[in-house]
Image (spheres, rainbow, N blue to C red):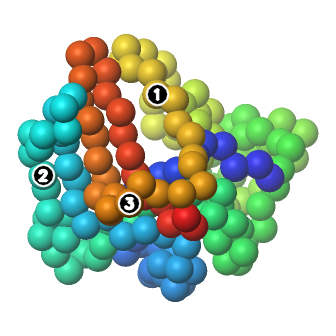
């Protein structure tokens, strides 16, 4: 089951939910704590800095983690059956129909199927997502620049460059 993407910043409400699901210790071990958001100009001068620990208070920390590690942790903890190689074709009050012709009843259906989500279209809205004019390229490095602990965005003319510590190096 391949993980798509590089890393993800988990805000405190997401971390709190993951802890409630029992994966808090594994997430904490694999992630980097993100104490602040820092927006800098093209020369590296601060435009604004937000203390995320102050902002979120007792909700919990914000964390950066690789998508591969997050998926491994969630799969290891999954206590429910999951299926690969089929697509959802219909939802009707807990009844789910799949592309192989099978159906099943579920208490919860999670639509984690991307920007053109079939689950979102069937459960929420037929509206097609509109391109916002933004493109992002993401990648991982094997080491973190010395002193980098904040989610840092360097703003430039018509673009930006972001750095997010994600744990594991």
Marking on residue 136: 1
Residue 79: percent from left, percent from top: 70, 77
Residue 131: percent from left, percent from top: 42, 15
Query: Which residue extends farthest left?
Result: 47
Q: Is residue 39 left or right of residue 109?
A: left
SS class, disc 2: strand
Tag 2 and tag 1, C-beta contact below 8 Å: no
Q: Indicate which label's residue lies in the foreground, 2 or 1.
A: 2
User: According to the image, label 2 marks what residue?
Assistant: 49
**Residue for point 29% across, 76% down:** 60
Mark 2 vs mark 1, CA separation in Å = 22 Å
Mark 3 vs mark 2, CA separation in Å = 19 Å
Marking on residue 146: 3
SS class, disc 1: loop
Seen in the picture, residue 34 relative to 109 is either above or below; the reply is below
Residue 74: percent from left, percent from top: 64, 68
Do we see residue 21 in this rendering? Answer: no
SS class, disc 3: loop
Residue 24: percent from left, percent from top: 49, 81
Query: Which residue extends farthest front?
Result: 146
Between discs 3 and 2, the one toward the N terminus: 2
Between discs 1 and 3, the one toward the N terminus: 1
Seen in the picture, residue 123 relative to 125 is either above or below; the reply is below
Quadrant in which the C terminus appears: bottom right
118, 154: nearer the viewer: 154
63, 12: nearer the viewer: 63
Q: Residues within 10 Å of mark 3 (few under 14, many from 20)?
A: few
Mark 1 vs mark 3, CA separation in Å = 24 Å
């Amino acid at each position: 089951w391949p993980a798509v993407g590089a890393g993800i910043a988990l805000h405190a409400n997401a971390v709190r939910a993951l802890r409630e699901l029992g994966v808090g210790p594994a997430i904490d071990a694999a992630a980097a704590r993100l104490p602040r958001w820092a927006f800098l100009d093209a020369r590296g001068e601060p435009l604004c800095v937000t203390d995320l620990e102050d902002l979120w208070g007792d909700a919990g920390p914000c964390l950066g983690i690789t998508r591969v590690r997050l998926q491994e942790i969630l799969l290891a903890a999954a206590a429910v059956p999951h299926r690969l190689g089929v697509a959802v074709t219909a939802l009707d009050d807990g009844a789910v129909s799949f592309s192989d012709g099978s159906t099943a009843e579920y208490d919860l259906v999670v639509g984690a199927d991307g920007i053109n989500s079939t689950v979102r279209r069937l459960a929420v809205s037929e509206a097609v997502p509109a391109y916002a004019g933004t493109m992002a390229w993401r990648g991982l490095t094997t080491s973190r620049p010395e002193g980098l602990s904040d989610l840092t965005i360097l703003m430039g003319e018509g673009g930006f460059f972001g750095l997010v510590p994600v744990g594991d190096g």
